[in-house]
Amino acid sequence: MSEKRIERIAIVGNPNTGKSTIFNWLTGLNQQVGNFPGVTVDRKTGNYQFERQAFEVIDLPGTYSIFPRSEEERIVRDLLFNNQDSDFPDLVIYVADRTQWERNLLLFTQLYDLGIPMLLVKTMSDKDALWSSSQHPIWKERHIPVVDVNGRTGEGIEQLKSAIAQFHNAVDLRKPILVGDLRSLQGDLEGQVANTQKRYAWIKENFPLKGAQAKEQLFHKSKWDSLLIHPIWGYLIFALVLFVIFQFIFRFASAPMDIIEGWFVQLSGIVKENLPSGIFIDLISEGLIPGIGGVVTFVPQIAFLFFFLSILEETGYMSRVVFIMDKLVRPFGLNGKSVVPLMSSVACAIPGIMSARTISNGRDRLITILVAPLMSCSARIPVYTLLISLVIPEGNFFGWIDLKGLVLFALYALGLISALLMSVVFKWILKTKHEGFMVMEMPSLKPPLMRQVGITVVEKVKVFVADAGKVIIALSIVLWAMASFGPSERLKNAEQKILQRAQTETLSPEKTSDLLATAKLENSYIGILGHWIEPVIKPLGYDWKMGIAIITSFAAREVFVGSMATIYSVGQDFEDNSRLLDRMRNDFNEELGRPTYNVASGLSLMVFYVFAMQCLATFAVVQRETTSWKWPIIQVIYMGVLAYLSAFITYHLFI
Amino acid sequence: MEESILSSVHLGKRGVITKVKSGFLAAKMADLGLFEGNEIEVIFKAPFGDPLAVAVGGTVVSLRLEEAEWITIAS
C-alpha cells in the first residue's frame, strides 16, 4: 500500500449537520465560491496550512445518499465515483450530527463500502447523552478515526487538523458493512430502497438509543414550533419578520448607499479636473467609475439582506416559512421555497434571485428567478415618487385614504399580482415530466452562529461584485458611449447653437453647462434613438424625452430621475427635485394640446416601470444564476412586452 | 391493527409504516428514513393541513399531502 500524503480533502455529509461550519473553521475566509461546471450548484473551495503543510478543502453539497435525488447529490455521486476527477479527494471528512445519528450515518456506510478513505467528525450538541456512541469500539475495528468538534466554539478543530495530517489509509483492512457493489444499483430504485433499509438496520443495531425515554425526548416538539407554524401566529410572525428586515434595510442601507454614490461622483470629478481631458479620461471618469459605482452601491443592500436571510436559514426558521407558505403559493407554479426570494425582491431583486439557489426543483427555481424582478424593488421608489408628485392631484377618499399613497400602493400591488400571474403562465409554458417533490428535512430550531452568518455575507457580496460586476461594468460603458457620442456634425452644430445663445443672452456658466449637457444628450446616439423610437412610444403617451429616459434607465431604474434632470437642464442636483418638477410640469405638448406629463401619461409611465426590466445588475445576476444568456434575454423581452402593453392600456384608460 | 394512508391521519397519530408505493419518491423517502417497518408520528400540520411533518428516527421530515398518499401506516 503506497502512503500518499493527504493534500486534497472533501467535506461530505447530510444537509444541516454543521458541514459548512467545519469548512469555515478550517479555511476561515480563505475560500472561493464558484459553480460546478454547467450547473448552478455552489462549488466552495478553500485552503489552510497545518504544520507547514498546505491543504486544499472542497465543501461538497449536502447529500443524503449516494443514489442521487437532486442535482446537488448527482454532483457528489459523480465526483466520488470517479477517482480520475480533478476534484477527487485524498480523504473525505464525513460530518455527522449526533442528534441525527441514524440518518446521518446512512451516507457514511455507503461511502465506507465504496472504499473511500474517511475520517468521521461528530458535531456535538446538548442531546449527546442520548446516544451510546461516544467511545464506540466499532470505529477502531473499522479503522475510522473519529474527532469531536463543537461547531459553535471551534473546539476540536486543532485535533481535526492533526488527525487529517496523520491520517493513514487503511481502506484495504476494512470489512464491508454490506457486501455488494453499490455502483450496480444505480438504475434500480427498488434495489436502492432494500439496500438503504439494510443499512438503517445496521445503524440501529450498532447505535441503539439509550433507553425508551430518549426517543420521547428526540420526538419532543419545540414550543416555538407550534407558534411558528400556527395558522394565525405563524403568518403574523412571518409578516413581522419581513417588516423588521425591510425597516432595517431602508433605514440602514440607504445611508451607506448614498455615501458610496457620493464617493464615486467625487472620484470622477477629481479625475476629470486633474487629468487632461480626452476620450480616454472621459471613458474613465464618466464610463468606468460610475459603472464600478453602480456595482458597489448595491453592496450595502445585498449585505444587509443576506445578513438577515442567512440568520433565517441558520436558525431553521426558513424551513418553517416554507412549511406554512407552500400550500398558498403552489397554485401559482411556485413552491414554499420561492417565498423568501420573492419577498426579498421587494428590497432588491439581486439578492432575491441569488437566494433562489435554495430551491432544489429546477423549474420552480427558474420561474422564481423570471418573476422576481416584477416585485417592486426600492430602485423604483424615486421614479414613482417623482411621477406621483408630478401628475397625481392632492386628494383623499373617505377623508383618510390619501390619493397619492393609494397610487403608490396600487403600483406595489400590481407588481406582486403580475409576479404571481406570470408564474402561472411560466408554469404552463415550462411543462416538466415530473412535478418535483417537497419531501424534505425540517431542521430543529437553534440560535444562529454569527461567524457563519458573517462568512455567508462576505461570500455573497464577493460573488456579486466579481461575477455580476463584470457584466454590469461592461454594459454601463456601452450605455455611457451611446450617451456621450453622436454624429460629430450634429453634436458640433447643437453645441454651437447653445454657445451663441449663451453669448447673446449672457447666460451664467452653470446655466450654459446645463444647456450643453442637454444638447449633448439630445444629439447623442441615445438621444437619436429616443427620437427614433418616438413613433413607437407615442401610443403610450410619451415623447422623445421620456424615450431617452427609458433607454438610459436600462442601467438602473433610478437613472430615470438623473436623465430627466439632464434633459430639463437642471443639473445633477438630486437633493432638489422641486426645480425638476417645475420644469416637467411646465412642459407643454403643443401637438396634443395638453401638458406632456398629465395623469394619463404619468400613470402610463409608472406602469411601464412596474413591468420593464430596467436593471443591468439584475440582468447580470440572472445570467450568472441561470448560466445562460437565453433566460435573461427572454426576461427582458417578456417584461418589455408586458410593460408596453400595460402602459398602452393605462394611457387609453385615463386619457 | 388499523391501517390508514398517511395523508388522512390526524395530528399526533403514531404508527409503523407498512407500505410505501414504489417509485422515485419511495427511494427519496427511504433515504430520509421513511420505509417499511420504521415508526413515525405526525407532529405538525401546516395551516391548511398541507404539508405535514412527521418525526422519524429522531428527525423531522415534511411532505406534501399528495406525497403522504404514498405511505400507509398501521397503529
Image (spheres, grey):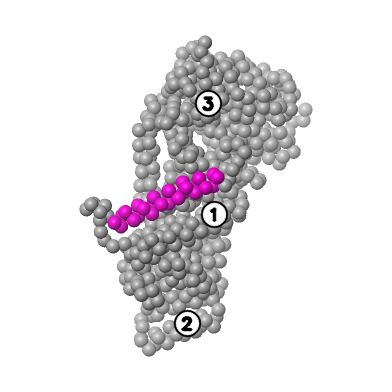
Question: In the image, what residue occupies the spot 72% across and 36% down?
Answer: A82
Q: Is residue A526 magenta?
A: no
**Marks 2/3 same chain:** no
The quadrant where residue A390 appears:
bottom left
Looking at the picture, which amino acid does disc 2 mark?
A: Ala
Looking at the picture, which amino acid does disc 1 mark?
A: Gln
Q: Write down the residue under mark 3.
A: B68
Label 1 crowding class (10 Å Cα cut-off): few <14, some 14-19, many 20+? some
Residue A572 % position (x, y): 40, 69
Residue sitting nearer the eye, A456 or A577: A577
Q: Write down the residue under mark 2.
A: A494
Give the residues in magenta.
A403-428
Q: Write down the residue under mark 1.
A: A635
Q: Quadrant of the N terminus of chain A?
A: top right
Q: Residue furthest bottom?
A: A504
Residue sitting nearer the eye, A513 or A147: A513
Question: In the image, what residue occupies the spot 41% across and 28% down?
Answer: A225
Residue sitting nearer the eye, A177 or A549: A549
Label 2 crowding class (10 Å Cα cut-off): few <14, some 14-19, many 20+? some
